[in-house]
Image (tube, rainbow, N blue to C red):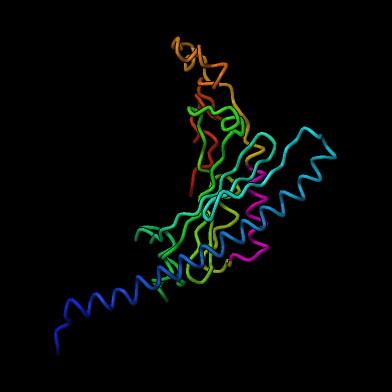
Amino acid sequence: MEKTTPRELIVKTLKEKSSLKQDVYHTNLQAFNAIKANAKKIADELKKDAMVIDKRLIIEYKDKGSFEFELRVAGDLLIFAMHTNVFEFDKSHQIWRTSYLKEDPFRSYCGIINIYNFLNDSFTYNRVNDSGYLIGRIFTNKENHYFVEGKRQLGFLYNDFVHDVLTPEAIKSVLESTILYCINFDLFTPHFDSIKEISVADMQTATEGMQIKTGKRLGFRFQADNDDFT
């Protein structure tokens, strides 16, 4: 039997992995563009509803480029950001126990779309010390199968990687669940001891840039909600 040369191994790897990663990247980019379009549609619809409820409520979609967009819902700002790289799951991950991956291990390669939640005022008033939270991650593979890793309903409603395909209906459901989670995730008062001491510099600039750090769960353990990533 002839021995495989390094060059042949390189070509084999390029064929099996590098080309595959290109497929996953483009599938994920298509998914992200579909999520963008659906987010804009949902924002337009919610804007009409909000105007009837209270004209002070602002619902707004902003395209921030090929790999990012923002969705403002009242006081919350959701930032969706697509990672440009492709990832594989660690061998200890539960998805490796499925027949779906056993039949084709390359199905484990996924693109990632991260979902962050910030207070809109943090950006409006340039409060650079404020905190935001990663509340969900959407994973898609070469066959457009997906699952969501995230907080509360995001973590248990969309975790059937074997069967779930990222259809327009699925995208709409994920977006609505994300919005619901954020608007029900309230701003808590920070512990008194965490903010009782403040520098002169911070106090002088507090009225300008609100340098006193703010976050929805500042002073509290975020995990206390018992909704860790699964």
Q: Residue furthest bottom?
A: 1
Which of 149 and 70 lies nearest the eye of the viewer? 70
Residue 40 rendering spot, x and y as whole percentages: 68, 53
Q: In this view, does 10 lie to the left or right of 69?
A: left
Magenta span includes 178: yes
Please count the marks in the image.
Answer: 0
Region in magenta:
166-181
Between 32 and 158, the one lying in front of the other is 32
- At x 53%, y 16%, the residue is 206
State the image quarter where residue 188 is shown: top right
Which quarter of the image is occupied by the N terminus? bottom left
Residue 220 screen position, x and y as percent? 50, 27
Q: In this view, does 16 lie above or below 182?
A: below
* Residue projecting furthest to the right: 52
Q: Is residue 207 above or below residue 24?
A: above
> Would you say the magenta stretch is mainly helix, strand or loop?
helix
**Camera-side residue of 230 and 33:** 33
Asked whether, in this view, residue 104 is left or right of residue 78, the answer is left
Q: Is residue 163 left or right of residue 6?
A: right
Q: Is residue 66 magenta?
A: no
Taking the spot 33% from the left edge, 77% from the top edge, the residue there is 15
Q: Which of 59 and 165 is in front in this view?
A: 59
Residue 120: percent from left, percent from top:
61, 34
Point 64% across, 45% down: residue: 71
Q: Where is residue 133 in the image (x, y as percent from the top left)?
A: 51, 38
Seen at 66% across and 53% down, the residue is 39
Q: Is residue 137 above or below residue 219?
A: below
